[in-house]
Amino acid sequence: MKPAVEVDAIVKSYADQVAVDHLSFSVDQKEIFGLIGPNGAGKTTTIRLMMDIIKPDSGQIAIFSEKLSESTKNRLGYLPEERGLYRKLSVIDSIIYLASLKGMNTRSAKKKADELLNKTGMLSNKKKKIEELSKGMSQIIQLIVTIIHDPELVILDEPFTGLDPVNTELLKQMIQDLKKQGKAVILSTHQMNQIEELCDRILMIDHGGAVLYGNLQEIKAKYRSNSVHIEFDGELGEVAGVAERRIHEGYVELVLEGNSTPKQILEQLVGSGISVSRFEVATPSLNEIFLKVVGKES
């Protein structure tokens, strides 16, 4: 199966500022791909290059193995960071009009709109004007507009901004449903917990270039610290191979010496008669990896 997106050594500069610097990556079909980085790293510029909104100075971009054309664009759904609904139009009229720009006829658009509005619990609002909706409700409508024409590649730029917990969960479920339908999803957000929960692979960029790229679980394993978290009943005496112990709320962290392994520590604990109810190798969160790699707060 060919990748949904292939980006090869793209460069984009503005005056003397390099926004994207020889960036290469691919996005597979049937995956959720996370695009992350600090403010000004080049994420939105990269998305605009993929969407053919702006042109690269050099490098190549292929969408479903083709250069982006008007016909290829209809295979894409794009939710920009800057939202764009017509506030005076009703929900249903907004959806139908914007669906028509993607080549849908009115009858098909109405039917699909009703399905998606019902699925998102928004059907009772279909005749309300956009300006009457909350920010979160407007964002759900914007996502409906993005996917109504059944695109094969969906690009979401900061989709969770301003959403309450209920609408955040709804949006996450919709993103997971897109993957189940066989679509490729590119998700760009500052919310690392959402990336960690949803994405299969990630690309972290800084100053326009790639600093981390690959399978999320493999990246987390690579940056795993040499320590274990334990919960237990009994008295924790001296444990060979432990350089330091740190007391946290609800658990103890054992920092291992260089040659020690988690298996050796667990065998010692069990052998000493301690009842261990939790034992796990400490894995850093994506946010911790982000701060370590980029060296600044997002």
Image (spheres, rainbow, N blue to C red):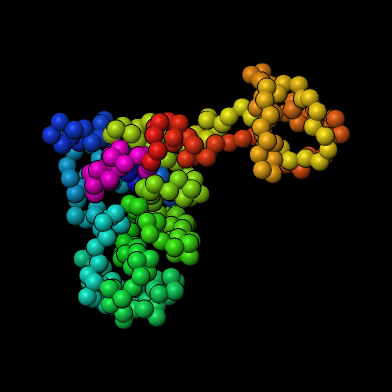
- Who is closer to the viewer here, 70 or 220? 220
Q: Residue at x 48, y 65 (%)?
A: 166
Magenta stretch contains residue 50: yes
Looking at the image, is 79 positioned above or below residue 220? below
- Give the extent of the magenta segment: 35-51
Quarter of the rendering occupied by the C terminus: top left
Q: Residue at x 39, y 46 (%)?
A: 190
Q: Is residue 239 left or right of residue 185?
A: right
At which x and y percent is residue 186?
37, 49
Can residue 224 be seen here? The reply is yes
At which x and y percent is residue 12?
20, 36
Magenta stretch contains residue 149: no
Looking at the image, is 261 positioned above or below residue 50? above
At which x and y percent is residue 246?
66, 32
Q: What is the residue that sits farthest to the top in this orientation?
A: 259
Can residue 280 be seen here? The reply is no
- Who is closer to the viewer here, 255 or 146? 255
- Who is closer to the viewer here, 264 or 74? 264
For the image, the number of numbered tags is: 0
Q: Residue at x 77, y 25 (%)?
A: 239
Q: What is the residue that sits farthest to the left in this orientation?
A: 15
Q: Residue at x 25, y 40 (%)?
A: 61
Quarter of the rendering occupied by the N terminus: top left
Figure quadrant of residue 276: top right
